[in-house]
Image (spheres, helix red, strand yellow):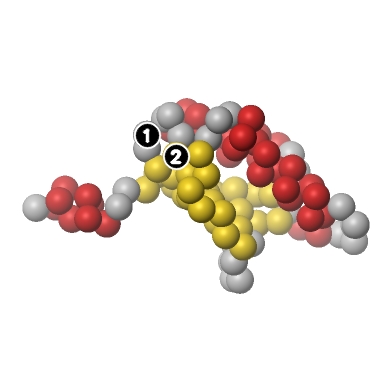
Amino acid sequence: MPDFMMAMTINPQAKRPRTTLSTDISESFEVFKVHNIKVNHLYATMGRYDFVAVFQAQDQTQAFRVASEINNGGILETETWPIIPYEEFTRLLA
């Protein structure tokens, strides 16, 4: 299965004072489970993005679907990229 990386930021509208933000973010991540996607790593970050997920999807279409559903939830905004291990990349250049 192909690997993908999804960088996520909290939607500015969702940052307004609310007591459920943590729960809302966790519920946004449930989209991965709904689509039977294996999340290899999920990190909270400091910087441009608030969260980064490294996951495996059946194909690019499934990765797009999950990103779209997370965006539609209104809590997180995503950027998603296909990724390959560096060693595999260097073999492509050889």
The residue drawn where x is 44% and y is 44% is 4
Total number of numbered discs in the rendering: 2
Q: Mark 2 is on which residue type?
A: Gln
What residue is shown at x 67% (from left), y 39% (from top)? 30
**Residue sitting nearer the eye, 11 or 92:** 92
Q: Is residue 49 above or below residue 36?
A: below
Left or right? Give the position of 4 relative to 64.
Answer: left
Secondary structure beneath dot 1 equals loop
Please, what secondary structure does the residue beneath circle 2 have?
strand
Whether residue 54 is visible to the viewer of this picture, yes or no, is yes
Tell me if 88 is positioned left or right of 1 in this view.
left
In the rendered structure, the answer to whether residue 9 lies left or right of residue 57 reads right
For the residues bearing labels 2 and 1, Cβ distance under 8 angstroms: yes
Dot 1: few (<14), some (14–19), or many (≥20) neighbours within 10 Å?
few
The residue lying toward the viewer, choosing from 83 and 40, is 40
What residue is at 27 percent from the left and 57 percent from the top? 86
Q: Is residue 80 visible?
A: no
Q: Which residue type carries mark 1?
A: Met
The alpha-carbon separation of the residues under discs 2 and 1 comes to: 6 Å
- Find residue 68 and name its label: none
x and y percent of residue 21 in the render? 82, 54
Q: Considering only vertical position in the picture, is 40 above or below 72?
A: below
Residue that appears at 37% across and 37% down: 2
Q: Which residue is mark 1?
A: 1
Say which mark, if any, is on residue 56.
Answer: 2
Task: Find the residue positioned furthest to the bottom.
Answer: 46
